[in-house]
Amino acid sequence: MTVYTFVDGPFGELLVATEDGAALSRVWLPPAHPEAGWIRGDDLPVLAAARRQFAEYFAGERTDFDLPLAARGTAFQHQVWDALRRIDYGSTRSYGQIADAIGAPGAARAVGAANHDNPLAIIVPCHRVVGANGSLVGYAGGLDQKRALLELETTEARLPL
């Protein structure tokens, strides 16, 4: 059973969901809509904590998230997502740098695919991954949302040279 809530963000409402009631399984960027049969659970502790932490993040008061997570993915995807969570707030890395960090040099495209499949947007900060030349590329919410998130984190995003 999927239980969800909405979270106000600077570019619309995010949809945050749990499948087990204890850990977050998905974060959808706006516009997002629950599926038929899902149950709204604003007071469920994990969803209430997510709403609070997102509010703090969007207010510039939180630099990382401390929530139980239950993302579904392959072992490689989890390696990539773990590496993304180690990118410092306000910093960026290239797909190649992430591939190197997980011991898979030359796997930048596979890292990009895992980034694309990230089910926990913002919490697992795929918006902090940029092209090798520092360009903003590939974001599910669109490049305007990616730019807005990077600008939220720092007035001058530290892009790789």
Image (cartoon, rainbow, N blue to C red):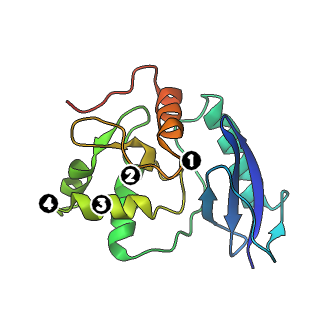
Which of the pair 93/70 is nearer the observer?
93
Between disc 2 and disc 4, the foreground one is: 4
Between disc 4 and disc 1, the foreground one is: 4
Give the quadrant of the C terminus: top left
Between disc 1 and disc 2, the foreground one is: 2
Q: Residue at x 46, y 48 (%)?
A: 125
Precedes in sequence: disc 2 or disc 3: 2
Which of the pair 139/14 is nearer the observer?
139
Q: Residue furthest top?
A: 155
Q: Residue at x 38, y 52 (%)?
A: 84
Q: CA distance from mark 3 to mark 1?
A: 22 Å
Precedes in sequence: disc 3 or disc 1: 1
The circle on residue 65 is: 1
Q: Which residue is mark 4?
A: 106
Q: Amino acid at mark 3?
A: Val
Which of the pair 97/61 is nearer the observer?
97
Between disc 2 and disc 3, the foreground one is: 3
Q: Amino acid at mark 1?
A: Phe
Q: CA distance from mark 2 to mark 3?
A: 10 Å
- Residue 102 placement (x, y as % from top left): 24, 60
Q: Which residue is mark 2?
A: 84
How packed is label 1: few (under 14 Cα within 10 Å), some, or many (20 or more)? Answer: some
- Residue 13 placement (x, y as % from top left): 72, 46
Q: Which residue is mark 3?
A: 111
Q: CA distance from mark 2 to mark 4?
A: 17 Å
In the image, residue 73 sits, relative to residue 29, either above or below, namely below
Q: CA distance from mark 1 to mark 2?
A: 13 Å
Precedes in sequence: disc 2 or disc 4: 2
Q: Residue at x 47, y 61 (%)?
A: 118
Q: CA distance from mark 3 to mark 4?
A: 10 Å
